[in-house]
Image (cartoon, rainbow, N blue to C red):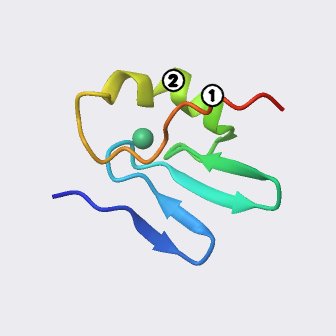
Amino acid sequence: MTTPTTLGNQTVCPVCTVKITHLLGRDQVTFSTGANSTREDLWQRVCQHVQDRPGCINKPDRRTP
Ligand SMILES: [Zn+2]
């Protein structure tokens, strides 16, 4: 069973193994390559492809800013 790892204000997606840092007002994503990105970009690049695997902590955010 996969469970998210939370370290302070960081959560690691157990499926995608990316680090999501919860900053004030937004979340910053750190890929395993070290590149920083957004949750939207993470979804486009990785998470939409692993929907069949439970445990991914990044879901599409349908809020409008
Ligand atoms: Zn994920």
Badge 1 density bin: few <14, some 14–19, many ≥20, Cα 10 Å: few
Measuring 52% from the left and 75% from the top, which residue is drawn there?
7
Residue at which label 1 appears: 41
Q: Is residue 22 left or right of residue 20?
A: right
Q: Looking at the picture, does residue 36 appear above or below residue 7? A: above
Q: Is the shortest distance between ligand 1 and the CB of mark 2 under 8 Å?
A: no
Residue at which label 2 appears: 45
Between 48 and 29, the one lying in front of the other is 48
Check contact, mark 1 vs mark 2: CB within 8 A: yes
Q: Quick one: which residue is furthest to the left in this view?
A: 1
Amino acid of disc 2: Arg
Residue 12's disc number: none
Q: Which element carries disc 2, helix, strand or loop?
A: helix
Q: Looking at the picture, does residue 39 appear above or below residue 24? A: above
Image spot of residue 35 (x, y percent):
64, 41
Amino acid of disc 1: Asp
Q: Looking at the picture, does residue 11 appear above or below residue 30? A: below
Choose top left, top right, bottom left or bottom right for residue 40.
top right
Measuring 25% from the left and 42% from the top, which residue is drawn there?
54
Disc tally is 2
